[in-house]
Image (tube, helix red, strand yellow):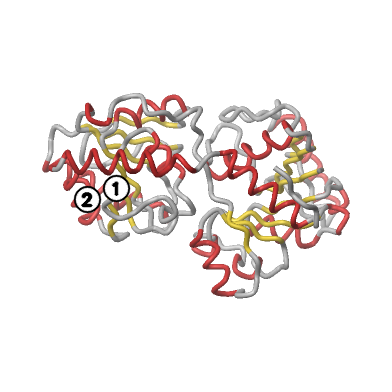
Amino acid sequence: MKINFVMPDFYKDKPIGGFKTIYSYANALVEHGHQVTITYLSDAFPAYKSFLFFIKQSIRYIYHKSIKYFPKKINWFSLDNRVRLIIDKTPIKITFPNADVIVATSSLTAKIVFSLSKSKGEKFYFLQHDESTFSVDHDTISTWGYGFHLMAVAKWIKERVHKYYPETKVDLIPNFVNFGSFKLINKISDRKDVVSMLVHPDPIKGTEYGLKALKIIKKRFPDVKIILFGTCSRPKETGFEFEYYQNASESKLCQIYNESMIYVMPSILEGWGLTATEAMQSGAALVTTENGGVDDFTERNISAIKVPSRSSTSLARGIEKLLLDDDLRQAIAQQGHDKVQRFTFENSYQLFVKSLLCGLGVAHEK
């Protein structure tokens, strides 16, 4: 198959969880003999309206094509060299490569894909969140009704689509754990009082509630070590001491998770919760909000402590509960580790390819 993933932006040095998922599928697809292109729309240029505008646009185009992304390489993910990257994209529809399959990966890209001719590929839509909840909403809900073949990474996203389009078929393709990068190294029973958390600038990630909860914990348990990580700059004025790692590699994240007794996910709404599964695989007990995305791999008080979202005090109580009851902490950490073992890349990849082939009307064989 010739497959074209259409993505909204190009991040050379910034790790993005949803992008990592797509890049993993791209690598596997080319490994199995398929031709894969990734087209980025971050540098789409509007049609020029005057000669002066044309000159400015031409200069900008030359800069983007020759300088901005040179060399065209993603530094934070090992993407197979056989995956073709089209970064300096223009909005001229004919310039999109012909393909068997074209996959929209966001509501913005869905609008572009919708306008393309059939020669650009059978149209699919890979849903990793409900983007209508984002600060910028590109008419997300309407894009679900375009008639594409829909794929969702979590049950709550599938249910959200069916709320508006009850008859629409949505293939469930759960995310996966990279077991090659994330391992249980330090014994669950031997861990010190360390709590870790991702910080993220998007309000929907609930970082403000998580930081307030950690401030409460640090006040009640001064000896607890707190480790934060993320792609943004170091948080300021938190009111407590912490270690911070910006753009941490997967090996560093594995180290953080293995050092952690508890991992906190404070999201208001989460597409899937990649860091939660990574932490669980690495032996950290999960304290999470009821954010939807973790429901596919957690059970309350069995494989995670689950509390209401938008509540710093509830998060703090959940963390405190595990700090005071080590038997419960170990049990939840072990159950969490066991629970995520079924989320293998092989299973997800097979479901992904099956969805593509069924959309094309081709029988799927493992």
Q: Residue at x 43, y 42 (%)?
A: 340
Vertical order, 271 against 284 (above or below): below
Vertical order, 246 against 107 (above or below): above
- Residue 233 rendering spot, x and y as whole percentages: 41, 36
Amino acid type, mark 2: Gly
Instruction: Tell me the element at label 2.
Output: helix
Going from N to C along the chain, the mark reached first, 2 or 1, is 1
Q: Which residue has dot 2 on it? A: 318
Q: Which residue has dot 1 on it? A: 287
Q: Residues within 10 Å of mark 1 (few under 14, many from 20)?
A: many
Answer left or right for 262 relative to 298. Answer: left
Vertical order, 79 against 58 (above or below): above
Vertical order, 169 against 36 (above or below): below
Q: Residues within 10 Å of mark 2 (few under 14, many from 20)?
A: many
Q: How many marks?
A: 2
Quadrant holding the C terminus: top right
The quadrant in which residue 158 appears is bottom right
Please tell me which residue lies in front, 48 or 352. Answer: 352
- Residue 150 rendering spot, x and y as whole percentages: 66, 60
- Residue 121 rendering spot, x and y as whole percentages: 82, 53
Q: Is residue 56 visible?
A: no
Proximity of marks 2 and 1: CB atoms separated by less than 8 Å: yes
Q: Residue at x 71, y 46 (%)?
A: 5
Answer left or right for 336 relative to 174. Answer: left
Q: Is residue 85 visible?
A: yes
Please tell me which residue lies in front, 71 or 178. Answer: 178
Q: What is the C-alpha distance between the residues marked 2 and 1?
A: 6 Å
Amino acid type, mark 1: Val
Q: Residue at x 20, y 55 (%)?
A: 313
Quadrant holding the N terminus: top right
- Residue 281 rendering spot, x and y as whole percentages: 40, 36
Q: Residue at x 72, y 41 (%)?
A: 38
